[in-house]
Image (cartoon, rainbow, N blue to C red):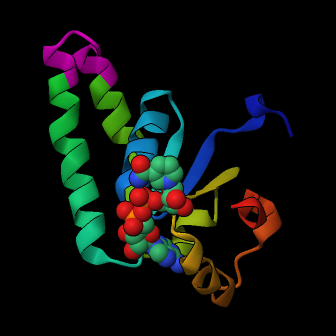
Amino acid sequence: MTIDDIKTMAVIGAGNMGHQIALHCAIMGYKVACTDLSADTLAKAEEFVASDLPGRVEKGRLTQEQADAARANIRFTRGFEDAVRDADYGLVTVLRRSLISLRHLGFECERADAAQI
Ligand SMILES: NC(=O)c1ccc[n+]([C@@H]2O[C@H](COP(=O)([O-])OP(=O)(O)OC[C@H]3O[C@@H](n4cnc5c(N)ncnc54)[C@H](O)[C@@H]3O)[C@@H](O)[C@H]2O)c1
C-alpha cells in the first residue's frame, strides 16, 4: 500500500488531538470516520467541526464548496467496528493507558501502528 491508496481513514479517539486531525484529514479530501468511547466527547468533536469550517470560509482559507466537501467527508460514530470497517488507514489518538481497551476490542495493532504509541 502507498499513500495514494489511502482514501478512507478511521480516527480512534476524538479528544484534543483526534478531532483536529480528523477535520484536517477531511479537509484534505479523505473520508474520515471518527470514533470515541465518550458520547460527550464525540458530540463536542462534531460541534467543533460544524463551528470551525465557517470560520475558515470567512477567513478565506477555504471556499464554501471546500468546507461543504470537508463536512461531508467526516462522520462521527460511537461504533468502533463501524469506524474501522472500511478504513484504509487508522489513526489512534488515545492516551497510552487507553491502549488496553483497544486490545480488549480486538484491535489489530499492526494495522494502525498502535504498538508504536
Ligand atoms: N493534546 C496534545 O497537544 C498532544 C500533542 C502531542 C501528542 N499527543 C498525544 O495524543 C494522544 C491523545 O491525546 P489527547 O490530548 O487528544 O487526549 P484526550 O484525552 O483529549 O483524548 C483521548 C480520547 O480518547 C478516547 N478513548 C480512549 N480509549 C478509547 C477507545 N478504546 N476507543 C475510542 N476512544 C477512546 C477518550 O474518550 C478521549 O476522548 C496521546 O497519546 C497524547 O500523548 C497529544
For residue 66, what is the image quadrant? Answer: top left
Quadrant in which the N terminus appears: top right
Q: Whole-percent x and y of residue 59?
A: 17, 13
Is residue 93 shown to the viewer in this render?
no
Question: Which part of the image, by quadrant, shows the C terminus?
Answer: bottom right
Q: Is residue 14 above or below residue 97?
A: above
Which residue ends up furthest to the bottom in the rendered image?
104
Magenta stretch in the rendered image: 56-66
**Rendered residue at 44%/37% (across/down):** 26
Q: Is residue 30 visible?
A: yes
**Residue shown at 76%/58% (left/top)?**
113
Q: Number of labelled discs?
A: 0
Relative to residue 2, is residue 12 drawn left or right?
left
Judge whether 64 appears above or below 37 on screen.
above
Residue found farthest to the top:
60
Asked if residue 89 lies in the magenta stretch, the reply is no
Q: Residue at x 44, y 46 (%)?
A: 22
| Occupied quadrant, residue 5 | top right
Question: Where is residue 110 drawn, in percent x and y?
Answer: 82, 64
Rendered view: 42 above or below 26:
below
For this rendering, which residue is in front, 60 or 97? 97
The answer to if 64 sits in the magenta stretch is yes
Indicate the position of residue 97 as horizontal and vertical percent values. Answer: 56, 79
Q: Residue at x 49, y 37 (%)?
A: 25
Residue 73, x across and y down, in percent: 42, 40
